[in-house]
Image (cartoon, rainbow, N blue to C red):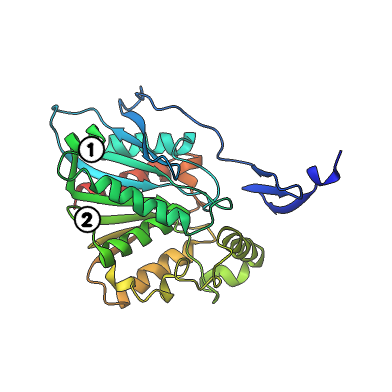
Amino acid sequence: MDSSSSEVAQDFSPFLKIFKDGRLVRLMGCDVLPPSRDPATDVESKDVVISKDDDVSARIFLPKLHHPTQKLPLLVYFHGGGFCIETPFSPPYHNFLNSIVSKAHIVAVSVHYRRAPEHPVPVAHEDSWASLKWAAAHVGGDGPEEWLNRHADFGRVFFAGDSAGANISHHMGIRVGTHGLPGLDLRGIVLVHPFFWGVERIGSEAQKAEGVGIVDNLWRFTCPASSGSDDPLMNPAKDPNLGKLGCERVLVCVAENDLLKDRGWYYKELLDKCGWKGVVEVMEAIGEGHVFHLLDPDSHNAVSLLDRIASFINHS
């Protein structure tokens, strides 16, 4: 047997490993749940194809309706996973979307974008923008997906995501502000533990050298063409379009024990100073780590996070 078949060339545990023979093995985020009617929340879900050629799709979630023609706020969700693992079909994301759709009583589109390293960043961002244009094609009520035609209120649209998905949500908000998306009124974005970074250390990052190295390496791995950690894709402070964010409200959720916590607070500081005219709020979960709400969804802090997001959407 060729020894290269078992020798690791790049180890990005706990995400994935690449072997010297070229094999890529994802170590987590590979489990899949089918769409269904969730017995706990009575939320129904189904999968749709957005671009067959590019393998972009989505899982759509619809709550129990009060009447057959009811219009509901639309949430477009971008999953996390360092741009390289997880899908909308992974149990933590499927279950979280069921919960937020039920709690906030909204329609949700959870986007399945292509992942690195097979499809390096910014492919995920381009796929996400294509997904938003697909969603906006339903504004007149004659798009390809009947749930959106009948029930999505395009005057009340929100983007949300966690970690890498929060990074994508931010950039989609920038694109709405700079390019526009006719017929779609983006009311706010929710960034949960956003995956932002930079060359200059801020806050507690200087005391966490090992974690800093992991983040630096992961970014280079998922975006090999990047200029580095100060790439505007990773560092909002370096983006000249930051003040053009295309919504009036932002909710940033951070966790006390998360290496990325200070980046979330810094993002608020940047928005407050860049000329953007909206309002940004920060919610910090004490004693918690990165994406804790997906790992322990029934915990007090996870329920509080869910409640805050639902409140943010429903009080627009």
SS for callout 1: helix
Vertical order, 100 against 253 (above or below): above
Q: Residue at x 19, y 37 (%)?
A: 149
Q: Residue at x 29, y 46 (%)?
A: 134
Nearer to me, 119 or 106: 119
Nearer to me, 91 or 17: 17
> Which residue corresponds to mark 2?
187
Question: Relative to 255, is 279 on the left or the right?
Answer: left
| Residue 93 badge | none
Mark 2 or 1, closer to the camera = 1
Quarter of the image for the N terminus: give it.
top right
Label 2–label 1 contact, CB within 8 A? no
Binning the other alpha carbons within 10 Å of mark 1 as few (below 14), some (14 to 19) or many (20 upward) gives many
Count the numbered circles shown: 2
Q: Amino acid at mark 2?
A: Arg
Q: Is residue 287 visible?
A: yes
Measured as percent of width and height from the top left, residue 215 is found at 59, 62
Nearer to me, 214 or 209: 214
Q: Amino acid at mark 1?
A: Leu
Q: Residue at x 35, y 54 (%)?
A: 129
Q: Is residue 6 visible?
A: no
Measured as percent of width and height from the top left, residue 116 is found at 55, 52
Question: Relative to 199, is 60 on the left or the right?
Answer: left
Res. 250 image quadrant: bottom left
